[in-house]
Image: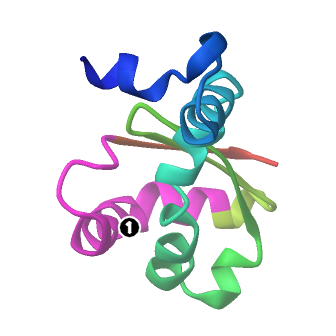
Amino acid sequence: MSEAEGRKRRGGLTDLSTALEALLRSHGVAERLRNIDVYPAWREVVGEDTAGHTRILSFQKGVLRVAVSSAPLLAELKTFRLKEIRDGLDGILGPGKVREIRLGPG
């Protein structure tokens, strides 16, 4: 009996863990849960003050999109701190988890 068949119960019913996994995957929740560690890592790398002026919009397929509340801070992060931020995230999350950081107004 295959693993998938083993998960099926009498009458064609699926066990709860399989159903829940499918539900989470279909709503994109599984992906977000896998990436939840990005939020505290961002705060740690940029610092509490800067983190308070930014908002992570999404993290999908290695692309981190972040809104920055002020133009001067956006310019600073893009111009002077982007490499530092990427290196810091690599150090916490593992090399290559964040392939790209897209900063924008927000």
Q: In x, y percent, where is residue 24?
A: 65, 35
The residue carrying mark 1 is 85
- Please tell me in which quadrant of the rendered image residue 90 appears: bottom left
Q: Which residues are magenta?
A: 74-99
Q: In x, y percent, where is residue 92?
A: 30, 74
- Please tell me in which quadrant of the rendered image residue 85 appears: bottom left
In the foreground, 83 or 20: 20
Residue at left 30%, top 41%?
A: 99
User: Main structural element of the magenta stretch: helix, strand or loop?
Assistant: helix
Residue 26 falls inside the magenta stretch = no
What residue occupies the far left of the structure in this picture?
95
Q: Is residue 73 left or right of residue 52?
A: left
Relative vertical location of residue 14 with respect to residue 89 in this rendering, above or below: above
Residue 81 falls inside the magenta stretch = yes
Q: Is residue 39 left or right of residue 4?
A: right
Q: In x, y percent, where is residue 72?
A: 70, 64
Q: In x, y percent, where is residue 56?
A: 67, 54
- Which part of the image, by quadrant, shows the N terminus? top left
Which amino acid does the dot numbered 1 rest on? Ile
